[in-house]
Amino acid sequence: MRHLFLILTLLLSSPLYAVEPDEILSDPVLEQRARDISKGLRCLVCRNENIDSSNAGIAKDLRLLVRERLVAGDSNTEAVDFIVDRYGEYVLLKPRMTRENAVLYLIGPVLLIVGAIGAFLYLRRRSRRPEKPLDNLSREEADRLEQLLKD
Amino acid sequence: MFAEIGHFTVLLAFAMSIVQSIVPLIGAQRNWAGWMRLADTAALAQFLLIGFSFAALTYSFVVSDFSLAIVAANSHSAKPMLYKITGVWGNHEGSMLLWILILVFYGALVALFGRNLPSALKARVLSVQAMISMAFLAFLIFTSNPFLRIAVPPADGNDLNPLLQDPGLAFHPPFLYLGYVGLSMSFSFAVAALIEGRVDAAWARWVRPWTLLAWVTLTIGIALGSWWAYYELGWGGWWFWDPVENASFMPWLIAAALLHSAIVVEKRDALKSWTVLLAILAFSFSLIGTFIVRSGVITSVHAFANDPERGVFILAILTVAIGGALTLYAARAGQLRTTAVFGLVSRESGLVLNNLLLVVATAVVFFGTIWPLVAELTTGRKLSVGAPFFDAAFTPFMIVLVAILPLGAILPWKRAQVGKSLKNLRGAMALSIALGVLVWSLQTGGRMLAPFGLALAAWLVLGAAMDLLVRARFRDNPIRTTLRRLRNLPRSDWGKAVAHAGLGLTVFGIAAITAWEQEDIRVVDLNERFTVGAYDFELTKVIDQNGQNYSAQIGSVTAYKGSREVAQLRPEKRFYPVQQMPTTEAAIDIGLTRDLYVVLGDKQDDGGWTIRTYIKPFSNWIWIGSLVMALGGCLSLTDRRYRVAGAARPSARRVAEPAE
């Protein structure tokens, strides 16, 4: 009996979906801004999902909150700040470029530069060396290698 | 009864892996042929034993033997047969057994087809392979035993997560694992080479087919996963930069780098120690992926059980494998001397640049994935790193890579002149830019993404075509000779061009769907027409219907273009009573130029229904492109110089065009 009750409640209170028709703002420009902001905000109870595509209740609340702020005349940054003030930076899917996050943002460019210098030095060395014969192969192995490479 | 035998054969395989990891290694050091040969027998025996265990587990799922703990937890008697079978790997323990099955499958392949490998190298490779299987069998037996019984079996099982009750589960994980685990071969070859202290062209030729095979299957696995997410999750997202996706994407990127650097080793006897390092890294990322998926350290949409004990065990395996291999590398890499000489501008340099970009891009993905963990450990702040970060931080590397790819692919070995090679690509470049400009002028609303993406895609495809034409010397010959020459080009040349063109198709699909997707969310009444983009839609009815293990509401939506009916769509809302879980089944009218994607939402109080409609232009090109990439890999695999398992036999017909 308890099971039946559970099934019925679940059937009746059918799941929420991402952006519902009644949430959509009448002003298409404002709505588009809300969508763009929503894609950068994390649904707090979900695993790595943004509020724009999440079905969770809190995601809906946040979507409505974003729209409320935009209607109240906030800029995109102000609306996002408003939410980060209340929910913490955990809500941002793209961490802010702060000193603490510097490593995250710099790792790519730094590695690229370091790697490029390394690669350049390697290539320059290669281009200056005289060609030497394969010296660490036995006669037999060299023959076998030749055979393989000829194929 | 079968389950007990399966349990027993797992234990036997574990014992066998211990023997196989020690005896052949000693044999190879001492040059004792008998001890080395033991590796073949042991590898085959491991495969047969694990194969039997897997069959026994599958049997338990098929007959719904709920006295087995994981069957009770993940299956249900009413579940369709297909999902009873795929349910074997729809859970942590079973998927681990599949992981190991594939691992020992590769070992058996080496034993069977590696006849041409020098016996010492083969013995060492199989020994390293056995060390990996030993570690994972221990993990399976001590922390994740799929054969545990429960004292009081339940009357019925808990069923499989409805999202997993999809044909996608039949193919996605096996392909993914074939790729993930296939990289263990490259790893074993690298470690064996380090033990021997020697890497030469022959080694590269043996290791490349295995890497290719792993990369091809990983490509297919990732593409299938992406497509599955696209049609199953109900809004058509195809990539989420989820930690688990990243876990499969990082090995793929490194494997792609490894494929390219192995060519340099093979053809030019350079980049040896780098290639060995990449081979170690590729499998290391597979292991890290396994850790991410199974430890629950990083939250993700499809992580398995979050069990700290398992996490620690995998972390230990990871530390020993990666740490051990890298230590060996540090000790031995110096012996890998390069003899080749080449100019600053050459195919070699192009491939070095390819490797640099792929590896740095991988590093960005890696840091993004673990950053939440690092930040919490070091500063105690909880933060998220998601799609917007990766889109911004990862994409630039790929754009540069794609932009230089056709040029790098066409540069001659040793010494090249950019100007001369560019001359061959002038037409391709002009045409790509023209296409981009054309699209830019045609589209309304001037986002640069689509024209730019299309130009890059065309550049890749046309560049690949030019690559083939240049190889066939089309300028110096009449068309008929060119065609004959094209036909006679080595398969690996075709493979290269096809794979690069496939990347172009994928780039186009991504750019098109990102720039041009149209979305509409609204409440409609029955038989009310509404317009989305160039199409009209009409919801004609919604009926209730029951499936084998779920109940469903099925909508009928007709799509029109003008007055012409183009598609009948049947989106579903399902409810799975055992797991108490609702799911949406989007209806998709698949097309080469667009998908019509309709999702049925809730019934409103006034009798209308929420309908989500998406027009997704060229979305299928993403996966078609991936499959074309995989096809290119397969073409390379069939090149007679490689042959599966690297058994390059001195035989067969001569190819008219000499391989470079």
Image: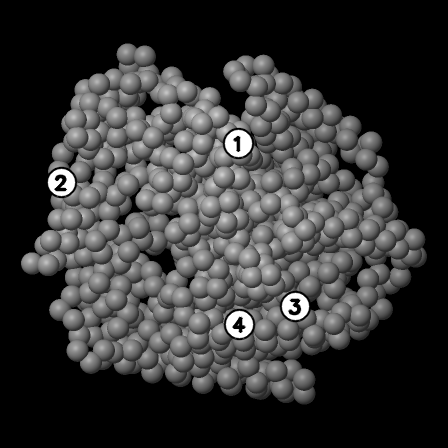
**Residue at 17% in and 74% down:** B153
Give the residue type at disc 1: Asn
Q: On what subunit does the disc labeled 4 rest?
A: B
Residue B477 seen in this snapshot: no
Q: Are marks 2 and 3 on the same chain?
A: yes
User: Alpha carbon of mark 2 to alpha carbon of mark 1: how far?
Assistant: 45 Å
State the mark number for residue A76. Answer: 1
Q: Earlier in the sequence, mark 2 or mark 3?
A: 3
Q: Give the residue pinned by disc 3.
A: B190
Q: Tell whether B206 sits left or right of A11.
A: right
Which of labels 4 and 3 is toward the front? 4
Callout 1 environment at 10 Å: few (<14), some (14 to 19), or many (20+)? some
Estimate the x, y position of residue B150 in percent, counting from the top left.
23, 78
Please state which of residues A1 and B465 is positioned toward the viewer in this rendering: A1
Q: Earlier in the sequence, mark 4 or mark 2?
A: 4
Estimate the x, y position of residue B178 in percent, counting from the top left.
47, 59
Q: On what subunit does the disc labeled 3 rest?
A: B
Estimate the x, y position of residue B164 in percent, counting from the top left.
31, 53
State the mark number for residue B545. Answer: 2
Q: Give the residue pinned by disc 4.
A: B315
Give the number of marks: 4
